[in-house]
Amino acid sequence: MAIRDIIKYPSKVLKVKAKPVSVVGDEEKALIKDMWDTMYFTKGIGLAAPQIGVSKRIAVINVTGDKKDELVVINPEIVKRSGRCDIEEGCLSVAGVNAHIDRYKNITLKYLDISGQVRKLQASDILAIVIQHELDHLNGMLFIDRINSLKRKLLMWRSKVGVKSSQRRRKI
Ligand code: NI
């Protein structure tokens, strides 16, 4: 078990487009294990590899906390999208900031699972949102990049002066 440090905004690695994984080998499997340990330890519901400083297209997701809902996505790609929705998102890499982000409500995701098999998954609502948040991380984008700069400045200021944010926030 290895809990890794979460890379925080404004670190540069969070702005880099992560590299596709060609083979899911021992190194990737060990990384994924550390990602689970780190995500559960920090009480997140999703974590992308760049958030622990590894620029690979891998994310782990569990929106319920139940073992059976664990999802590992490697080289994820959204192939279908429809509808709109939003929740108040937070991010393990951006302390104290929460914001409603406009996302697709329904997506179809193509990805490799941990055994390297190509999979397709249809996801809606919170699961679809978390997947989109993680895909942003893999593309070097943070959720705060999706809000206008004035609102972003206000949110960052509020987090610095310690204005209490919603308890319902989900750290992704
Ligand atoms: Ni995040």
Image: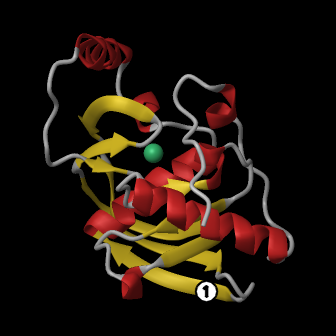
Q: Is 119 left or right of 147, judged from the image as shown?
A: right
Foreground pick, 65 / 113: 65
Can residue 46 be seen by looking at this rendering? no
For disc 1, does the CB lie below 8 Å from ligand 1?
no
Q: Please, is residue 21 above or below residue 25 in the view?
A: above
Q: Position of residue 93 (x, y in %)?
A: 47, 37
Q: Does any portion of residue 52 appear in the rendered image? A: yes
Q: Position of residue 92 (x, y in %)?
A: 42, 42
Residue at the disc numbered 1: 119
Q: The N terminus is located in which quarter?
A: bottom right
93 w.r.t. 40: above or below: above
Q: How many marks?
A: 1
Secondary structure of the residue carrying tag 1 is strand
Query: In the displayed structure, would residue 55 be above or below residue 124?
Result: above
Ligand 1's quadrant: top left
Q: Which residue is painted at 86% across and 70% down in the image? A: 22
Q: Is residue 31 left or right of residue 43?
A: right
Q: Residue at x 64, y 82 (%)?
A: 113
- Amino acid beneath label 1: Arg
Q: Residue at x 55, y 38 (%)?
A: 141
Q: How is the image coloured?
A: secondary structure
Q: Nearer the viewer, residue 104 or 18?
A: 18
Residue 89, image quadrant:
top left
Residue lying furthest front: 1
Q: Position of residue 97 (x, y in %)?
A: 30, 30
**Residue 46, position in %: x, y?**
44, 59
Closer to the camera, 81 or 67? 67
Q: Does 8 sit above or below residue 151?
A: below
On the picture, is 40 further left or further right than 118?
left
Instruction: Name the residue located 71 percent from the left edge and 36 percent from the top edge.
Output: 16
Give the crowd class for mark 1: few <14, some 14-19, many >=20 residues within 10 Å. few
Image quarter of residue 3: bottom right
